[in-house]
Amino acid sequence: MSNDKISKLPEPYVDFDLLIHSVPNGDEKAVAKVREHDAQLTKPAGSLGNLEALVRHLARWQGKSKPTLDNPMVAIFAGNHGVTAQGISPFPSEVTAQMVANFSAGGAAISQICALHQLNLRVFELALEMPTKDFTVEAALSDKDCAATIAYGMEAIAGNPDLLCIGEMGIGNTTVAAALYAAIFGGTGADWVGRGAGIDDEGLAKKAEIVDKGLALHLGEKRHSLEILARLGGREIAGMVGAIIGARHKNIPVIIDGFVASSAAAIIYGVNPNALDHCIFAHTSNESAHQKALDKMGKVALLDLGMRLGEGSGAALAAVLVKTALHLHNNMATFAQAAVSGKSE
């Protein structure tokens, strides 16, 4: 959905709109230095394919000719949703807080991935005791609450990571993400809903109906993407929006997880598609409409593992590839060091 001809943007979003439109560009000189070093490594030019591109991506968005991964961080944003009162998930909302505790205790998949690969894991609980409102009845968030949560997400990178992986936890949030995609890119609930945590055909049809009800209530007039976020979204999605924006302005490349995390990117895309250039999309989720969302944004996922776990797991696995790519770039011998003859002129 274009934001053209929207009469007046509510005041809480004005500064965020400006930040999304005024994003800094990448450092092409740093990229050139990476290319120069890569050409000297003991391999045919371009033979590491996308691994080489990942190092260039780091250089461009960190603004460093010698990129670093000294402080990679996985940030999980957790929120609860009032729309779960409509029976859209087989799990109760209490599971959100229970899983957050599991993340901290080290029992979740993301906990184990981060521990194994030395990724800093941080979990941000967003008022779990106060679910958003049911978007089939009223706006999920007030404009003030939505803006405050975006701002909180921007502060989540205060530890200055050199790579940010974003993920989420929130019972019912695949329904919320589907509603956001439909509002931004068009279509009905049936075009965007999936099975989430494992609903049956009857539950799938109900999810589509719930999304359509929310769209009918909130999209009677043209709205800015940030307004759409408030009316249909959730705190964890607003937090991820803030983290993505904040990272761009602090020269931190971002890896975005699956279906729900990508809906935060879609909100930003609806304001300024170029504001996502610093983002890598980790994987194509097994949630049915995720590939469609990536296509709408013109993005190609790094991996396709048939996953639909959420919690930043796909983003963390993509970070492992990025770490591998940078290790090769920094530690492979050059032709001169290895006394290997280069390509004949």
Image (cartoon, rainbow, N blue to C red):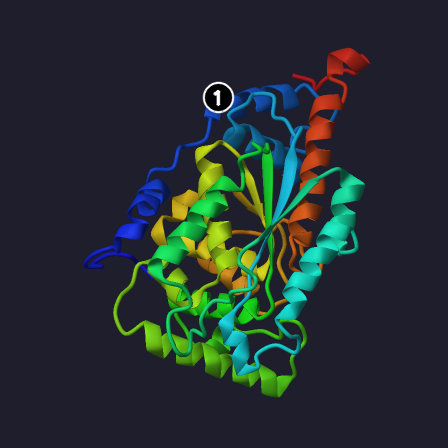
- Secondary element type, mark 1: helix
Q: Position of residue 135 (x, y in %)?
A: 42, 73
Where residue 213 sits, quadrant-wise, is bottom left
| Residue at 62% in and 50% down | 282
| Residue at 47% in and 46% down | 152
Where residue 90 sits, quadrant-wise, is bottom right
Q: Is residue 215 above or below residue 344?
A: below
Q: Position of residue 219 (x, y in %)?
A: 32, 72
Q: Is residue 61 above or below residue 99?
A: above
- Determine crowd level at label 1: few under 14, some 14-19, many 20+ residues with C-alpha closer than 10 A: some
Q: Is residue 298 visible?
A: no
| Residue at 61% in and 21% down | 66
- Viewer-side residue, 34 vs 49: 34
- Viewer-side residue, 168 vs 26: 168
Disc 1 residue type?
Lys
Q: Which residue is mark 1?
A: 29
